[in-house]
Image (tube, rainbow, N blue to C red):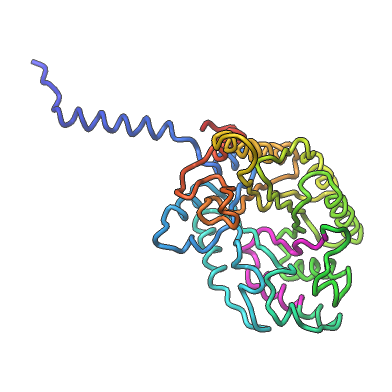
Amino acid sequence: MRSRANPLLRTLAAGAAVLASLALAQPAPLRALAEQRGLLIGAAVGGALYDPLEPEYAQILAREFNLVVAENAMKWASLSNERGQYGFAGADALVRFARQHGQRVRGHTLIWHEQLPAWVRNGAFSREAMLAVMQEHIQAVAGHFRGQVAYWDVVNEAVSDRGGLRETPFLRAVGPDYLEHAFRFARAADPQAKLFYNDYGADGINTKSDEIYALLKALKAKGVPIDGVGFQAHLDSTFSPRQARMRENLQRFADLGLEVHITELDVLLRGAGTREERLEAQARVYAEVLEACRAVARCTAVTLWGFTDAYSWRAAAEPLIFDALYRPKPAYHALLRALGGTP
């Protein structure tokens, strides 16, 4: 006589089958899809990583991204407010997190005119004195992370929106060749790291991207050790990567022999229409930026400036791919599809 299965066992088996089907239906995370395609997908990281009340932050960061960059923890004023005195605790914690989760680290940034200590910003330095200050800082920071940071934004935002080099303490004291010296100092501090120039407002073919192109071409011709260029891509949902000729722009820099990265991508929720329509427009921009990168062989990384609206520097405009409650937005699913996954 055949015995009937225990009802409890039948219930448990049915529950296990449901869980298994749900697991199969769960889409692969962004990083897994990106890695299959030889691409890095990154996110800028803020203080919420260390907040015990926000466990979702670390969980999503580890699950979805294979590249991390400190939003502020590696900037000059965050590391040092007195000459020769450095505190690396916050930056070290991020590097440890990345190592534990198999992520690469982007260093941001060594030379920038913002978030400087007052003694650098307001100092009256001779050319030789400022070069010494720059070399000390780059050696201290890039040297501290030697072998741990894959990419450094060596010089950030050096080109003015009005044309020419931006007026900064470094330009005033040293002259235009401060960029060349910065890259040479960085190469000496960490020969293994790839060295990048990074800027905003140059995502498509326009006057500013023309200036940056000419600048980097001249630096390369002089033998300056510059390996790549970063495009920040702070955009909004009305932007059209195709109309801006973004792919063509990335390609011309790649043709200089430079590695190309999208470094600070976020997309403000703007424009006409319903909220659902604006979310879909935002998703389209994210997908088209990723597609433009994937169309260029030397474009190897797309990094978002954060990933949850809760901690975005432009939070009011909801620019990221997870909402303030860590729920994926249409933009997240658009990136999945652009990487060949299923939402």
Q: What residue span does the magenta drawing correspond to?
A: 134-160
Assess whether residue 32 is covered by the magenta stretch.
no
Marks counted in the figure total 0
Q: Nearer the viewer, residue 65 or 249?
A: 249
Residue 67 appears at what percent x and percent y?
59, 53
Q: Is residue 325 left or right of residue 204?
A: left
Residue 216: image quadrant is bottom right
Residue 69 appears at what percent x and percent y?
61, 58
Residue 172: image quadrant is bottom right
Residue 145 in the image: above or below residue 333? below
Q: Residue at x 64, y 40 (%)?
A: 286
Q: Residue furthest top?
A: 1
Task: Give the position of the N terminus as an image quadrant.
Answer: top left
Asked if one can make out residue 265 in the rendered structure from this viewpoint, the answer is: yes
Q: Residue at x 12, y 21 (%)?
A: 4
Q: Is residue 328 left or right of residue 53?
A: right
Residue 224 in the image: above or below residue 337? below
Assess whether residue 159 is covered by the magenta stretch.
yes
Residue 320 appears at what percent x and percent y?
57, 47
Asked if one can make out residue 38 in the rendered structure from this viewpoint, the answer is: no
Q: Residue at x 53, y 73 (%)?
A: 89
Residue 265 appears at what percent x and percent y?
65, 49
Q: Residue furthest left?
A: 1
Q: Residue at x 46, y 44 (%)?
A: 327
Q: Is residue 142 left or right of residue 125?
A: left
